[in-house]
Amino acid sequence: MNPTIEFIDLKAQYADLKQEINARIQRVLDHGQFVMGPEVRELEERLEGYTGAAHCITVASGTEALLISLMALGVRPGDEVITTPFTFVATAEVIALLGATPVFVDIEPDTCNIDSTLLEAAITSKTRAIIPVSLYGQASDMDEINTIAARNGGIAVIEDAAQSFGATYKGRKSCNVSLIGCTSFFPSKPLGCFGDGGAIFTSDAVLAQAMREIRVHGQQRRYHHTRIGVGGRMDTIQCAIVLAKLERFDWEVERRIKVGDAYLRLLASKEGIVPPVLRSDRTSVWGQFTIQVDGRNAVLERMKSAGIPTAVHYPLPLHLQPAYRDLCRSAGPLANAEAVAARVVSLPMHPYLTAEAQRTIVHSVSEALTQFA
Ligand SMILES: Cc1ncc(COP(=O)(O)O)c(C=O)c1O
């Protein structure tokens, strides 16, 4: 593997932030409140300020954020939750865990986000929530989705913003563009910790209170349980790490946007490569920078032999996964999701990626395509 091109460069980030991160961790070691210590609320307040949402509830992971959100909404067996089949499995997993049915709606072939024009036809009397995923770092048509949800009896909309923290939609921050926003602080995410972590955002005080209780085994006060909950807290140390990383986050978002722009310029004239499409009213944090090509295997092999790391997000849509095939419902054909799953390739993407590395990467992709054409 080419040591100079990393898929995600967490080492460079740590080198940049070492003092602040180490100091933050040391403070937690000194005060010893490893669970629900002061950094937990400090981070929540900082993120409320950042997103503009009235309430932030940190949780154990992005998956837990989605699960707790659905639990707070009261989703239960027999209910339906509409989402995209072209996402990380956690989005549908939490629906199935609650005994509800994931209902899949096809995606737009260019953004790979849920196609909002197909949404209304998928709604039934059982629909309790809609989970659009801000895939690869770009939000879906949130206004259209919110409007459809409102017009159909006030269905809850949860943005799965695991890949898009820091992105904007019509000037508003991802995580604060629908009733609920859920993000992940998994290390490789745009804002990551050094393990598992996540957060829920909402401006609904009643839901926020329910989420805070569900996060700690459904208790209102110690050992008094008014609802069923989970052990879903985010560790104090992980909150401290995110607080340290927030110092550089604006710079990182700016860099991500610049690196994404540079890729788009380099790819514009390349035969056989379909670059990702960004809608003009949004910004992406490029959680993944994902192109589409025919003959993906050849490209992956060529990149590997050139020492350039790549990934496939995602090779098989969820309605075709053995665990979901029989328990999901497909609202119409999912042809775009199936076609795109065979064509996507994610390229190295992080704030420290140099212009030279980007040229090498793009050269390597186009060479593979001409070689195997
Ligand atoms: C779209 C999406 N949803 C949910 C998750 C789950 O987040 P976590 O890994 O923090 O549980 C991820 C993480 O990969 C994701 O990409």
Image (cartoon, rainbow, N blue to C red):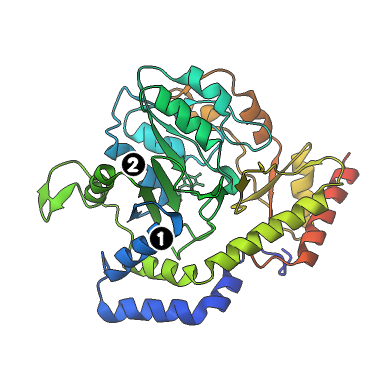
Q: Nearer the viewer, mark 2 or mark 1?
A: 1
The x, y position of residue 328, in whole percent, is: 45, 24
| One can see residue 102 in this view | no
Q: Which mark is residue 163?
A: none
Q: Quadrant of the C terminus?
A: top right
Q: Amino acid at mark 1?
A: Gly
Picture coordinates of residue 226, whole percent (x, y): 13, 43
Q: CA distance from mark 2 to mark 1?
A: 21 Å
Q: Residues within 10 Å of mark 1 (few under 14, many from 20)?
A: few
Left or right, 220 with respect to 349, comes to: left
Instruction: Give x and y (percent) for residue 63.
Output: 40, 46
Tell me the amino acid under the disc marked 2. Answer: Ser
Residue 65 horizontal side relative to residue 221, left or right: right
Residue 74 lies, with reference to residue 181, above or below; the image says above
SS at circle 2: helix
Which residue is drawn at the image coordinates 59% and 61% (left, top)?
253
Residue drawn 60% across the image and 40% down it: 314
* Mark toward the start of the polypeptide (2 vs 1): 1
Task: State the image quarter where residue 82 is shown.
Answer: top left
